[in-house]
């Protein structure tokens, strides 16, 4: 496999800065903490605007407490008025008001790439997004999104229309999500039961790349956060979308292969795994 990038050389101001909109996860397996670890390892300086406080562990999510939209806006605006941001990464938002707040903020920076990881449920299956939140994401955030990174259930929930009777084909989901405004859609195969995890990147012309990875035996807390943040790091550092997706998949698979058991539930990706160097 290709070796992984080392942090960028030079003075601190040379680091690409990525602003993360995400919830706090006290286990640091997922959420803002997972984003921070991933971005720092891949040579970026991570910035945060917290969207919610969660009560969770490696077993599941007990509760989600959204931050007030005004406070979310103030966090992000303070950073954006002071620090140049090379990419946005968006995770769990927690409320319709917060979806609208983030959409309003990123609309002021149309040239800055945005990676949206639509966190709609926990690994255990806890529902983390109401129908109203999903509708707001479709209407307000997808038109601002450079790359959407849903797993198969998330892609189907986002693409679902009234009257759809059968389980939608993922290619149809991708077409619908692109039509809603996302420039690219990467649908991951983590929830399938195949020997390989197959991730497919779609663009306006159809499938751009399809990558298969040996399915690992464990269950992981924060794999989607890791992948989306790794892609955001690549885009922030000027890597083209296809290469950023490829490199991020390789990094994420390695973090899962060397994941560790931090608690009684899912394994935690090892974002600073041994040998992770250029």
Image (tube, grey):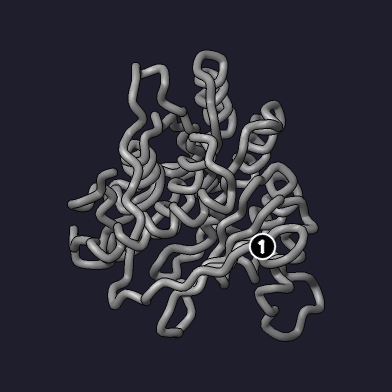
User: On the image, which quarter does residue 257 sit in?
Assistant: bottom left
- The residue drawn where x is 39% and y is 43% is 35
Examine the rendering and report whether any part of residue 62 can be seen. no
Q: Position of residue 45 (x, y in %)?
A: 39, 29
Taking depth in this image into account, of 278 and 28 the one nearest to the observer is 278
Relative to the observer, which residue lies in front, 166 or 6? 6
Q: Residue at x 77, y 79 (%)?
A: 164
Q: Position of residue 104 (x, y in %)?
A: 69, 32
Q: Quadrant of the N terminus?
A: bottom left
Q: Is residue 8 left or right of residue 146?
A: left
Compare residues 41 and 165 and report the one nearer the observer: 41
Mark 1 closeness class: few <14, some 14–19, many ≥20 residues within 10 Å: many
- Above or below, 68 relative to 28: above
Residue 125, given in percent of the width and then of the height, sits at 44, 70
Q: Which residue shows up at 77% across the image and 55% down it?
A: 180
Locate residue 262 relative to residue 214 in the image: left or right.
left
- SS category of the residue bearing label 1: strand
x and y, in percent, of residue 126 in the image:
45, 66
């Amino acid at each position: 496999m290709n070796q992984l990038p080392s942090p960028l050389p030079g003075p601190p101001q040379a680091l690409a800065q990525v602003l993360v909109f995400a919830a706090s996860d006290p286990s640091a397996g997922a959420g803002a903490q997972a984003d921070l670890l991933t971005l720092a390892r891949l040579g970026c300086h991570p910035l945060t605007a917290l969207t919610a406080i969660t009560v969770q562990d490696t077993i599941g999510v007990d509760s989600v407490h959204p931050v007030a939209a005004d406070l979310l806006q103030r966090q992000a605006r303070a950073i954006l008025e002071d620090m140049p941001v090379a990419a946005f990464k968006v995770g769990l938002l927690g409320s319709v008001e917060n979806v609208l707040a983030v959409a309003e903020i990123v609309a002021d920076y149309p040239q800055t790439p945005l990676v949206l990881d639509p966190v709609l449920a926990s690994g255990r299956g806890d529902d983390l997004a109401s129908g109203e939140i999903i509708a707001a994401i479709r209407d307000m955030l997808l038109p601002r999104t450079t790359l959407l990174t849903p797993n198969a259930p998330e892609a189907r929930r986002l693409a679902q229309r009234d009257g759809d009777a059968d389980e939608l084909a993922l290619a149809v989901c991708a077409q619908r999500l692109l039509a809603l405004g996302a420039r690219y859609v990467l649908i991951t195969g983590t929830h399938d039961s195949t020997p390989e995890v197959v991730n497919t990147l779609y663009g306006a012309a159809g499938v751009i790349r399809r990558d298969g990875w040996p399915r690992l035996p464990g269950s992981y807390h924060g794999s989607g956060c890791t992948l989306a943040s790794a892609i955001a790091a690549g885009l922030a550092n000027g890597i083209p979308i296809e290469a950023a997706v490829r490199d991020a998949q390789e990094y994420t698979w390695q973090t899962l292969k060397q994941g560790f058991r931090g608690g009684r539930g899912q394994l935690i990706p090892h974002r600073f795994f041994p040998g992770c160097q250029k």
